[in-house]
Amino acid sequence: MLTSALLVGSAEAQTASLNGRVVDPSGRPIPGAEVTVSLLQTGWEEKGATDAAGIYSFPALQIGRYRVRAEAASFQKLEKTIVATVGDRLVVDFELPVLGDRTVVTVVDTLVQVNRENSTVSTLYTRELIQKQSNRRSLVDELTAKGVRLTAQRRALIEIMQEAEDHLDASSLLSLARKREPGINRATVYRTIEKLKSLGLIDELDLMHMNGEKHYYEVRPHRDHIHLACLHCGGIEEFSSPTFEELKHEMASITGFKIQAIRVEVGGLCSKCGTKKQEREQSLQ
């Protein structure tokens, strides 16, 4: 039995895993997209399909160089090339252009490798991912499509929220809006916030209550993310990964729960504050 277990463990150790997400140009998942991996040295290939969250997975690939192709009805096909080495956890995402779009798509060899022993690589990758894929919805377009009347004051508030790089509370929103529309009042701010919340267009955040009971607001992105709150400097980072999407899908599949909104906040120390703390501790030793 021991020999058998060792052989199984050895076989697993000689493979790599690959997963990722297939989305449309707006960042929405494409369920049922076909993903094919082809081992270039031998011509062996395996096909898979994305789930409801647009996620695909190949948990055990042989070591070698692969071409990964993603395709779906009404979308252009894309291919990327990766190299899988022992123990790699590879993440390759696709954003498929709409079929007939005149945008020129250049396909280049892409190596996305997340090393188990190097958390920095994972952090850098996921930050780049969130910037590219968690694009915000257009509030003006969404409200217009829903037939919501936009007064000058309401439009000013919406444009400020759309353009904001930081998370704004109601007071900050009011202050910025008065620079554009001096006559705006606090009641209009709260009515607009409630309207946007009821339509599912913005999220209300506590951000670990670092500033008391203040609530903050952000435009809901096409892809959910986790807020990382530094309890020392107060900085906020946004983190997203295919694993988070897989967890949401698993929760929904097992429980039958229809997820409409999800918010996760994590408190700790950012990389800069964590490094400074470590340096101080070392200097005292």
Image (cartoon, rainbow, N blue to C red):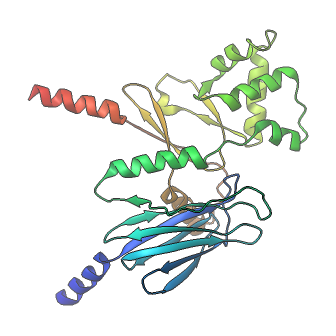
Query: Is residue 7 positioned above or below 278 on the image?
Result: below
Of residue 184 and residue 206, the one placed in the foreground of this image is 184
- Quadrant containing the N terminus in the rendered view: bottom left
Q: Where is residue 265 in the image (x, y as percent from the top left)?
A: 48, 40
Name the image quarter holding the C terminus.
top left
Left or right of 117? Residue 65 is: right
Where's residue 194, x and y in %?
A: 75, 32
Q: How many labels does the image show?
A: 0
The answer to whether 79 appears left or right of 281 in the picture is right
Residue 164 appears in the rendering: yes
Tell me what residue is drawn at x 77 percent, y 18 percent: 187
Q: Is residue 224 visible in this depiction of the protein?
A: no
Q: Residue furthest left?
A: 285
Above/below status of 128 relative to 23: above
Residue 80 in percent (x, y) is at: 54, 67
Residue occupying image coordinates x 56% and y 43%: 131
Residue 126 lies, with reference to residue 144, above or below; the image says: below
Residue sitting nearer the eye, 18 or 205: 18
214 sits to left or right of 156: left
Quadrant hosting residue 273: top left
Name the residue located 21 percent from the left edge and 33 percent from the top edge.
278
Considering only vertical position in the picture, is 218 above or below 115? Answer: above
Residue placed at 32% from the left, 69% from the top? 87
Q: Which residue lies furthest to the top in this view?
A: 182
User: What is the quadrant of residue 249 in the picture?
Assistant: bottom right
